[in-house]
Image: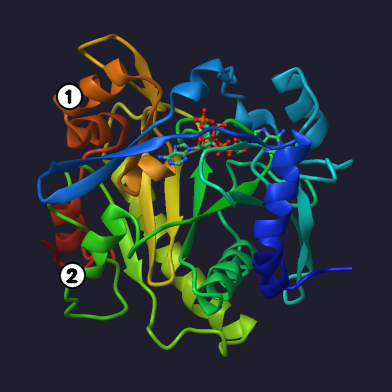
Amino acid sequence: MPATPNAIIKDLPERFQKAKESGDLLFFPSTIHKHVEGGVEYEIRLCPALQHKPNLPTPHFDAAQDQKKAEIQQGKPDPFAPPYVPNLYIGELKDVEEDTDYVVLFNKFSVVPHHILLVTKEFHSQTAPLMSSDLVQAYQLILAARAAGQRFFAFYNCGNLSGASQPHKHLQLIPIEGDGPPIEKLARSVNLEVPNKPFTLNSLPYANHIYRLPSHLGPNSDAEELSHYLMSGFMGLLDLTISSIRHDPTYPTGPPSYNVLLTLEHIHLIPRREEWYVLKETQEKLSVNSLGYAGMLLVKSDSELEAVCKEGVSNILRGTGVGSVHDLQVQGNDGEQDSAL
Ligand code: B4P
């Protein structure tokens, strides 16, 4: 029996506690370090306990069009397929418009309490673009959290070079304290001349494409209206992302990789060309996923923290992202407006 987004959000604290106490959910304590650079206050999360979590090899998502292939490539069962671990299973959601089912699970390796995964019930590949139902279900969870006085945002690591480690299609949602992730705050400060056209944050040294959702979207919006705005925004950003990638002559072959951030107010798409950044100082490899492009990086030791600050967060994000061709996109009228900061 499908649950509602409100019921999922309401049950999180009690279920999280139970999952943690059972030992099925592993919680890794961390501390946040603020790092100001180029006018952005980045959040670098130091989590030494994660050193003991093995890094999963990145699966080759391109060939993983079904669950069995994905399991063979990973050399182990798909953790997002049934039977679900009862303490990690929160409930199911159904998108009636698109007749698509989802399961909501706790992230087994949790750094932020109440970090959840919105997983397609049938196997779909993590290289596939988001569909209307993916966006609507994630947005409805964000709205349900807002109604309960909390701020959540969703992210999607799409493709081999995006920081993803599981080939079964999943979005992730985490709560955030204060008024949002650092890069979202920057996006919010932009005054748009044309309200429904994508824009870019020019002060960031990598290609980024952002769409502002209309402010009237809320708990009273029906799925059809949400789908209309979320999909037209997402498709416009995806075109620009592909265009940014096409302008990079050395971009690796294969399906494009990119990160998606979905907040109450914006959709962000960031094209990716590298999963890892090698820190000059220590030669350590830093994995960057969507959260990095929200302005939230994860490090596993004091020396890594120091090396990241020395290297500069914007150099790291430029290294794993793609160069901006915003001016060409505006001249070519590729659907992006001239902006911002
Ligand atoms: P992916 O999209 O495939 O990859 P990811 O979020 O980059 O996490 P990754 O697995 O690469 O872990 P990492 O060491 O970088 O997402 C897969 C998700 O499924 C992850 O959340 C993973 O933990 C979860 N998962 C894997 N096996 C599972 C299972 N059997 N059952 C349920 N869930 C399972 O990072 C470690 C953790 O820190 C991740 O949760 C990551 O999302 C989180 N994290 C990274 N940066 C962070 C930041 N700046 N702030 C807070 N948390 C951060």
Q: Nearer the viewer, residue 189 or 46?
A: 46
Q: Measured from the top left, where is residue 13 in percent x and y?
A: 65, 58
Q: Residues within 10 Å of mark 1 (few under 14, many from 20)?
A: some
* Residue 27 appears in the figure: yes
Q: Residues within 10 Å of mark 2 (few under 14, many from 20)?
A: some
Residue at the spot 32% in from the left edge and 62% down from the top edge? 210
Q: Quadrant of residue 168?
A: top right
* Residue 119 appears in the figure: no
Which amino acid is tagged 2? Answer: Val
Q: Quadrant of residue 176?
A: bottom left
Residue at the spot 69% in from the left edge and 37% down from the top edge? 25
Q: Is residue 7 left or right of residue 218?
A: right
Mark 1 or mark 2: whose residue is earlier in sequence = 2
Q: Is residue 35 left or right of residue 179?
A: left
Mark 2, residue position: 190
Q: Nearer the viewer, residue 243 or 293?
A: 293
Mark 1, residue position: 311
Residue at the spot 59% in from the left edge and 52% down from the top edge? 114
